[in-house]
Image (spheres, rainbow, N blue to C red):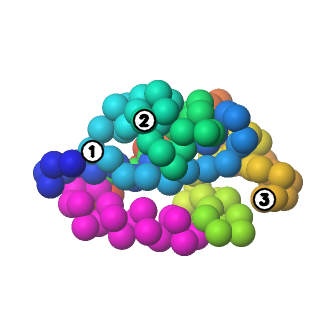
Amino acid sequence: MSHQGPFYVYVLRSLADRERYIGLSNDVSRRVREHNAGKVKSTRARVPFVVVHQESYQTLAEARAREKYLKTAAVDGGWIRMAGRLGVPRPADWVSQSDGPARPSDDSRAGGDSLQAHN
């Protein structure tokens, strides 16, 4: 990965098991294709994936720090609570059985993609 921004922290949802995957890339489209083609060992058994959230950062250090935070917050449904605080839409399909019931989102847009720029 190049050390020139922008860098993206992304959240994927597996359509096979509904679990999330949080990653970092300078090209989210390419990276999702790699995940869905089974080229990523850690996600190979859980394809296909869809992007449910992504954020943009100008430096690799910022993106890595955010990825680490989200992976930590993702434990025990923390991602769902954190997403709500950010105002990220939470469609029902984001919520796995272990996350508990989905609550309605204030965001009326359909779909799940969201891009928030961080400079």
Spatial distance from mark 1 to mark 3, Cα to Cα? Answer: 29 Å
- Percent coordinates x, y for residue 67 in the rendering: 42, 62
In front here: 35 or 28? 35
Please state which amino acid type lies under the numbered disc 3: Asp
What residue is drawn where x is 70% and y is 35%?
Answer: 16
Please state which amino acid type lies under the numbered disc 2: Lys
Which is closer to the viewer, label 3 or label 2?
2
Q: Are marks 1 and 3 in contact (CB under 8 Å)?
A: no
In front here: 119 or 5? 5
**SS at circle 2:** loop
Q: Earlier in the sequence, mark 1 or mark 2?
A: 1
Q: Which residue is mark 2?
A: 39
Q: Which residue is mark 3?
A: 99
Q: Is residue 75 magenta?
A: no
In front here: 37 or 9? 37
**SS at circle 3:** helix
Is residue 40 shown left or right of residue 105?
Answer: left
**SS at circle 1:** loop
- Percent coordinates x, y for residue 40 in the rendering: 44, 42
Q: Which residue is mark 1?
A: 26
| Type of secondary structure dominating the magenta stretch | helix
In front here: 42 or 118? 42
